[in-house]
Amino acid sequence: MTAIHHVGITVSDIGRSLDFYEDLLGGERLGPYERSGPRIDAVTGHPGVVVRQAFVRAREGTTIVELLQYDGGSGLSIDPDNGHAGAAHVGVTVTDLDATLAHLSERGAEAISVPVTTSEPLAGWRVVYVLDPDRVRVELMEPPATHSHPTA
């Protein structure tokens, strides 16, 4: 069996990012934990690094977001704009896009655009990107009514 277990995001402030993702996913918050030593040096490729690690488990489903703050890492920050090769984003299915977007906006999250309706292969989905505290794109995705409530 092959399955995606989690999505990891390197952040600049673990507390701020934990608040954002816990608010978005409405689930369980684990950590932060502090990791260092030879095993962490080896697995990260950054000798002497201290990693603050936390997880947010979504209220529904099996999604886990891992947040990592590196102290003593490379010191570089990337521009996570989706137009740059190597950038990634997280897609989150929501039941009410407008309410979720309003909730996040009240807490300072910025949307890239107004929600749009997609074409094939996800025809009828409403989507919008919001920026997390480090400007990582998070795609909010609301399925069409017929998708979320199949008929018999």
Image (cartoon, rainbow, N blue to C red):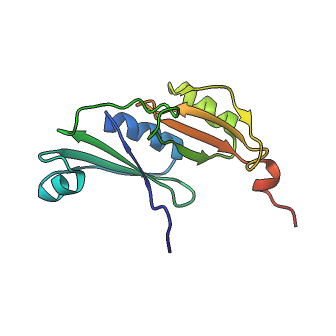
Q: Residue at x 18, y 46 (%)?
A: 46
Q: Is residue 29 left or right of residue 125?
A: left
- In the picture, measured across the screen, residue 106 lies left or right of residue 152, that is left
Q: Is residue 19 left or right of residue 46?
A: right
Residue extending furthest toward the front: 85
Report the quarter where the C terminus lies. Answer: bottom right
Q: Name the spot of residue 14 as percent of width and height, x first.
A: 32, 38
Q: Give the residue displayed 74% in from the left and 44% down from the top.
A: 125
Pick whichever, 114 or 15, lies toward us.
114
Q: Residue furthest bottom?
A: 1
Q: Quadrant of residue 17?
A: top left
Residue 79 rendering spot, x and y as whole percentages:
41, 29
> Where does the image place residue 123, in percent across and percent down from the top left?
78, 46
**How many marks can you see?**
0
Residue 107 in picture, x, y percent from top left: 51, 27
* Residue at 31% from the left image edge and 50% from the top image edge: 31
Pick the residue in front: 118 or 151.
118
